[in-house]
Amino acid sequence: QCYEGIKAANKGNGVFLVIKNYTGDVLNFEMAAEMARDDGIEVAQIIVTDDIAVENSTWTEGKRGVAGTVLIHKIAGAVADHGGTLEEVRQAAEAVNKNLASLGLALHPATTPESGKPGFELAENEIEFGIGIHGEPGYRREQLRSSKEMAKEFYDKIKAYLHLEEGHKVVVFVNGMGATPLMEQYVFMNDVLNLFEGDEVVVAKKLLGDYMTSID
C-alpha cells in the first residue's frame, strides 16, 4: 500500500514521505521507498519525533510521532506547493521536527482492531499522561486533575525541552485525539495560553481541533 501510494503521488520530481516514529510505520515505508527507488523514483523522508513523553515505548524506538506530524505535513507541503525541490522540502521538514515537542493524555485507552482489547486499563477517575496514537500507555497514571493542573505539567515539560524564553515565538497546538469535546479543548487552550502569557513567550499562531486522531 505504501509503495502504491508513492507511485500514485509521483509527478516526476520525487516523493517525500512523512513517517511517524513507530517501528511498523518506519519498516513498511522504508521498504516501499526502496521498491520505488528501484523503479527510478526519487524518494526522501522525515521520521517525526515530536512526542517527548517517553524515549522508548511500545512499537517505538526513540520518541514517537504524534500531533506534530500535522505541522510537518502543512509546512513541508507549502514548500512543495511553492516549487521547492525534494531536498528543500526535506530540509524544511527537518527544521520543523527539531523544534517540535508534544505530550498527550487520555481518559480512556484505545482498542486496536487486531488485539480487540484496550492497550491498557484506566478506572473512571484516572488519567494517563503521555499516551501514543495507537493506544500505547504513557509515563504516569493518576487521579483525574483539573485542566489548569494538567496544562501546567505539560507546559513546564515542553518549555524545558524547547528552552523557551521571554520573546521566543511559538505555534500553540491543542489537538483532540477524536473523543474530547471541543469545549474542553478550548478550556485547556485557554489555560495553556495564560501560561505562555505569564512567561511573555509570543504565541504567533494557535491551532485547536481534532487534527491527528487515534482509534476510539
Image (cartoon, rainbow, N blue to C red):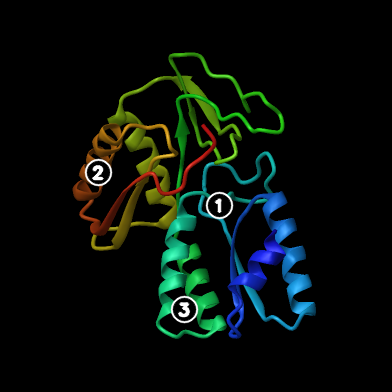
Q: How far apart are marks 2 and 1 (CA)?
A: 25 Å
Disc 1 marks which residue? 65
Front residue of 47/183: it is 183
Q: In this view, does 38 lie to the left or right of 78?
A: right
Query: Residue 116: where, in percent of width, then height?
Result: 67, 26
State the residue position of label 2. 195
Depth order, front residue of 159/36: 36
Q: Which residue is drawn at 74% across and 74% down?
A: 36
> Residue 86, position in %: x, y?
56, 81
Instruction: Give the image location of residue 147, x and y in percent.
Output: 30, 30
Nearest to the eye among marks 3 and 1: give it: 3
- Amino acid carrying mark 3 in the image: Ala
Secondary-structure class at tag 3? helix
Mark 3 or 1 closer to N-term?
1
Q: Residue 207 carries which label?
A: none
The mark nearer the N terminus, 2 or 1, is 1
Q: How far apart are marks 3 and 1 (CA)?
A: 21 Å
How packed is label 1: few (under 14 Cα within 10 Å), some, or many (20 or more)? many
Position of the N terminus by quadrant: bottom right
Identify the residue position indicated by label 3 in the image: 80
